Image (cartoon, grey):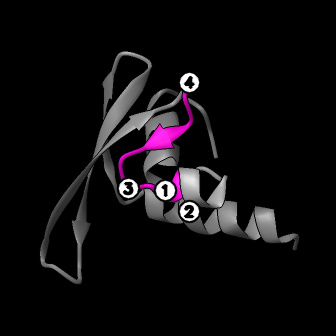
Amino acid sequence: MPDGLKLFKERSASAARREAVLVGNGGFVSSYCRSTGGYIDNSVNIPDKKCSCGKWTLYKFPCACAIAVAMKQGFAP
């Protein structure tokens, strides 16, 4: 399986465990973090391809937060 497809499937699985709330063209994602034992909140801007977690910008590939928002908007992984 190509690396991009594998990464997308992994992030889609992670996105399915996150709660996304739509705000305009982007969204707000809250997810439970096992390492801290708390919730992590991120802001996602779909049109600008940015998330406050920084992974979308760093890796040039949608992070799990962005995928969660896209799924909430009706886009299937």
Residue 8: image quadrant is: bottom right
Can you see residue 22?
Answer: yes
Mark 2 and mark 3: Cα distance apart in space: 14 Å
Give the residue type at disc 1.
Ala
SS class of the residue under badge 2? helix
Q: What residue type is labelled 4?
A: Pro
Alpha carbons under labels 3 and 1: distance apart = 10 Å
Cα distance in 3D space between marks 4 and 2:
19 Å
* Dot 2 or dot 3, earlier in sequence: 2
* Identity of the residue drawn at 59% across and 50% down: 62
Type of secondary structure dominating the magenta stretch: loop
Nearer to me, 17 or 49: 49
Name the one closer to the observer, 14 or 59: 59
Neighbour class for label 4 at 10 Å: few (<14), some, many (≥20)? Answer: few
Answer left or right for 23 relative to 74. left
Q: Which of marks 2 and 1 is nearer the N terminus?
A: 2
- Residue marked by disc 2: 11
Q: Quarter holding the N terminus?
A: bottom right
Under circle 1, the secondary element is helix
**Where does the magenta region start and end?**
47-56
Question: In this figure, which residue is indicated by the disc labeled 3?
Answer: 53
Q: Do the residues labelled 2 and 1 touch (CB within 8 Å)?
A: yes
Q: Which residue is drawn at 57% across and 59% down?
A: 58
Identity of the amino acid at label 3? Cys
The correct choice, above or below, for 32 with respect to 50 in the image is: below
Across and down, in percent, residue 57 comes to 56, 50
| Residue linked to disc 4 | 47
Measured Cα–Cα span from mark 2 to mark 1: 5 Å
- Tell me the number on the disc at residue 64: 1
Q: Marks 1 and 4, how far apart in space? A: 16 Å
